[in-house]
Image: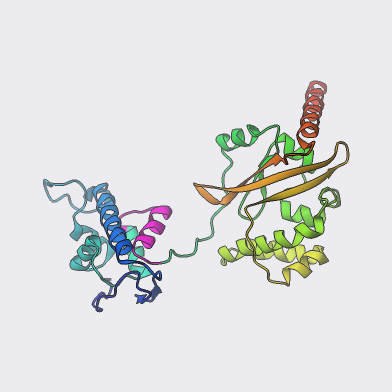
Amino acid sequence: MQHNLGEPPVRWGDGAYAGGVTTSHGTSAAQRIRLRDELRHFLQTRRARLTPEEVGLPSGGRRRTPGLRREEVAVLAGVGASWYTWLEQGRDIKVSDSVLDAVSRALRLDEHERAYLYRLAGVSPPQPSAVAEAEVTPELERLVDGWLPNPAYVIGKHWNVLVMNQAARAAFGFTSADRNCLVSFFTNEKYRARFRYWEETAPTLVAEFRRDAARYPDDPEFHLLADELRSRSTEFAALWARHDVRSEARGTKAIEHPTVGCLVFEHATLHLPDSPHTRLILHTPLAGTDTRAKLERLVEREARRNAISLVEAG
C-alpha cells in the first residue's frame, strides 16, 4: 500500500509538524543545508550497497551505477518515485515516522542507521524497543579483568550483574547470590553495610532506575523488579513513590571493608557502543587516599586464597 504523500511541503527543522512528528527547533539555514547534503549522501550510499537480487527484484540488465535505482527503492518502500527522489535530493517535503520506517526497511537499515536517518530528516528517533540482555563476550571479560587491580563490572539493562572482576568482588562483597546490584543494594544487609553513605546513595539509584524504566515502557521486567523491591524494602517503596528521575555518569563511592577499612573510589559509567543499554562501571582509587595500597593488598590476598582453593580442589 502506497503512503499518501500529497501534502504541501514543510521545511525541515523549522519546528513545524512533519507528518505528525515534531522536528527540531532553532535549526539555522546553514545547518539545514548540511543535514540535507548528509541525508542525500547517506541514502545514495545505502542504495548503492544493495542489489536487486538481494531485495527480490529482477536485475533489469546492465546498470551504469551499482545498487538499486531510486524507483526501485520507492516501490519497496511503498512511496511515490518522485517523492523518494525529492527526499534523496534534500528537498523541502513532508516526512513522517511511518514513511521513514518504510524507507529504512527498503534499504535494510539496522537500528543505528535508522536512528541516523531520523536525525538527518529532522525527526526525533523512536523510543528503543525492548531488547534482550547483552551477551558477555570474551573481549568484554578481558576488558573487565584488564582493569585490575581496580574494580570493574558490567550491568545489563535490568541492572543484572553480567561480569565482574576479582577486585570488585573483594571490595564490594559481591557473591554468587548477588545477581542484581539494585536488589542487593536494598535487600542484602552485608552488601549494603559496606556503603558508608548508603542513605545518600539510595535516592540517586532509584531515580536512575526509574529513568531506565521510562526508556523501555513496554518492558515488563522493570515493573516486576520495582514491585519485588517495593514488597521487600520499605525504603525502596518510599523512594519509588517520589517519582524522581536522575542521571549521573560519575561520582565518588566510599566502601567500609571489614578487613582493610575505608576504600574511596571515583567511578564512571560507560555505555557500550554496540549495546547502549549495557553499562561498564569503572572504579579508580581517589587521589590523596590510601585506597590504592589497601586495594592492592586486598586483591593479592584474594588471589592467594583462590589459588589455595584450586589446589585443594585438586
Q: Position of residue 27 (x, y in %)?
A: 36, 67
Identify the image quadrant of residue 101: bottom left
Give the quadrant of the C terminus: top right
Identify the image quadrant of residue 95: bottom left
Q: Is residue 124 above or below residue 184?
A: below
Q: Which residue is outermost to the bottom?
A: 7
Could you tell me which residue is drawn at 81 percent across and 63 percent down? 233
Could you tell me which residue is drawn at 81 percent across and 55 percent down? 198
Q: Main secondary structure of the magenta part?
A: helix
Residue 268 in view here: yes
Could you tell me which residue is drawn at 68 percent across and 42 percent down? 283
Could you tell me which residue is drawn at 73 percent across and 34 percent down? 166
Q: Position of residue 302 (x, y in %)?
A: 79, 30
Residue 75 in view here: no
Magenta range is 106-123
Q: Is residue 192 rendered magenta in the image?
A: no
Q: Is residue 114 rendered magenta in the image?
A: yes
Q: Position of residue 114 (x, y in %)?
A: 39, 57
In front: 17, or 106? 17
